[in-house]
Every structure is written in structure tokens, then in C-alpha cells.
Image (tube, grey):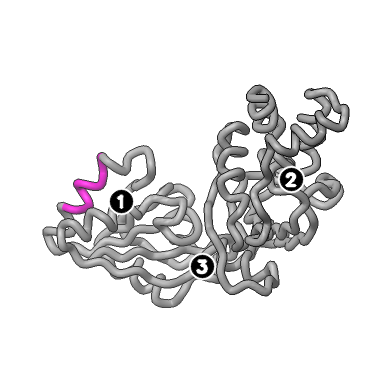
Amino acid sequence: MLYIVPTPIGNLEDMTYRGVQVLKSVDKICCEDTRTSQVLLDHYGIETPRMAYHKFNEEKVQGKILDLLREGRDLAVISDAGMPGIQDPGRRLIQAAIREGLDYTILPGPSAMVTAFIGAGLEEEGFLYYGFLPEKQGKRKKVLEDLKTCPYPLIFYEAPHRIYKTLEDMEEVLGKRRVHLGRELTKKFEEYIHMNLGEDLESQVKDKGEFVLIVEGGNQEEKPVDIRKELEDRIRQGMKKSQAVKDVAQSFQIQKNQVYKESLKL
């Protein structure tokens, strides 16, 4: 049996009783980082042999894991924190187990995105989970542009060194929406922050710890902006083309380069 076992996202006491029992009983534990997992395993007195299984050796090690399962061994997969298969190794292994007809089971447990979504106190029942946005600003803005009209709250993960830039890009692309941040969830310095995009960031948000961001969804009733028409109207009123481009971009929270490309067609 292949066991997918979630681990605490911060507080070690959030490990489930079943999870501990499984990790003690299997033949081997596949860890995202054996050094990180050592802290958790030592805390619960788990001495099961372990092996490294992460995104950099996933293809190489996967065959060995499948061979052990075929031999009738029981294996567990854990990530550094949270549920394997969500932003962490595990998904490809589950896909391989399905193809091979091998038995697997998923243990329920800690999840940062669900914890943060509940902590945001929103009215909506549904949400769209994206995960980590691209590191490069251009690609990041492109993803946000694609998600702009989604009517559901958007959930992202973000690292501390990019949090300010990401929030600034969100405000530029999505406008002044409501955003809820969960920082260092379940840990000593856990914090929930509720603010509007565009507000003073540094006075409210410390760039330390891991973040979950929940951004208000778009308005389904909003009609797409006819950029060319808006430009033509402004130019007709006497604006220079460069002024019109700037005004349309600011008025409708559209990326300036997108408006500029339309202006070239006039």
C-alpha cells in the first residue's frame, strides 16, 4: 500500500493519530527533505527507515518506489509541510500507481490553503486555488490577467521575499480588491491580515514567513473594456495619444503595454 500522509504546516501537534501510526508501521517513508522530516519524526518517536523523494530526484526514485510496492512493501510519502501532491511531490507517483494498478490511499489532514480560506471569513463557499505565481514579473502579470474575470476568491501561496512585489502586481492588474493574508499559519507568530490591494503594505505586512493570499473574485457582470473605443473617445476630446494610453490604463486598471499595443492600431 502507498500511503499519502499529510504533515503539520507549522505546529507539530497537528499531526493526526492515524498519520503517526501509519508512519510507524510502513516499511519506508519517502520524504521531501529527510533533514526537515527528521524533526517531526523524532518528535513522535518514529524510527522507520526513510529515503529522499523530491522534485529534483522524482523521476529517478519513482521507479524504485514502484518496484518496492510491487514486492508488497508498504510505503508512505510525506512533504516538508502539508499535503503531498499540492505544490509538493506526490502527484506523479499517484498517477503512476493508478497506471500500474497499485493500491494507494490518501490520509486527510493539514492544508494551508483551506486553513487560510476559513480564516479569511468570506461569504463564498467556493474558491479557485492557483498556488505559487511565476517568479518573473511579466509571467506573473500574465497569469493574473488570465484570472482577472474569475468570480471566485483566488488563493495563492507566496514567499516572503516576493510578497510586496506580488501584492503590487495584483493591485496593478486586478485593481483595489479586498485581500486576506494568512502568515505563518499554526506557528507562534501566526497572523491574519485583512486589507485592500493598494494600501500601504509595509505598515501592515511583515515580509517574514510563508504566506497564503486570498484575493476577492472579479465581478461577473463587468463587461470587457473596449480599449480602442476608449482611446478614440479620448483622442477625439483632444488628448494626445500618449495621454490617452495612460488615462485608459489607469481608469480601467489595465496594463499600460496592453493599451499601448491597441493604440498602435489607430
> Where residue 29 sits: x, y (%)?
32, 57
In front of the other: 48 or 52: 52
Residue at 23%, 64% in the rendered image: 74
- Amino acid at dot 3: Pro
Spatial CA span between label 2 and label 3: 30 Å
Q: Which residue has dot 3 on it?
A: 110
Name the quadrant of the N terminus: bottom left
Tell me the tag on residue 237: none
- Element under label 1? helix
Q: Which residue is mark 2?
A: 171
Q: Residue at x 39, y 65 (%)?
A: 5
Per the image, label 3 sits on a secondary structure element best described as loop
**Horizontal side of residue 193 vs 182, given as left or right:** right
Q: Quadrant of the C terminus?
A: top right
**Residues at discs 2 and 3 in contact (Cβ within 8 Å):** no
- Marks counted in the figure total 3
In contact (CB < 8 Å): disc 1 and disc 3 = no
Disc 2/disc 1 C-alpha distance (Å): 35 Å
Nearer the N terminus, badge 2 or badge 1?
Answer: 1
Q: Residue 163: image x %, image y %? A: 69, 44
Residue 92: give its label.
Answer: 1
Could you tell whether 159 is left or right of 69 in the image?
right
Residue range of the region highlighted in magenta in the rendering? 60-66
- Give x and y (percent) for residue 229: 71, 38
Decide: few, some or many residues near mark 2? Use Cα within 10 Å; few <14, some 14-19, many ≥20.
some
**Which comes sooner in the sequence, label 2 or label 3?**
3
What secondary structure is marked by label 2?
helix
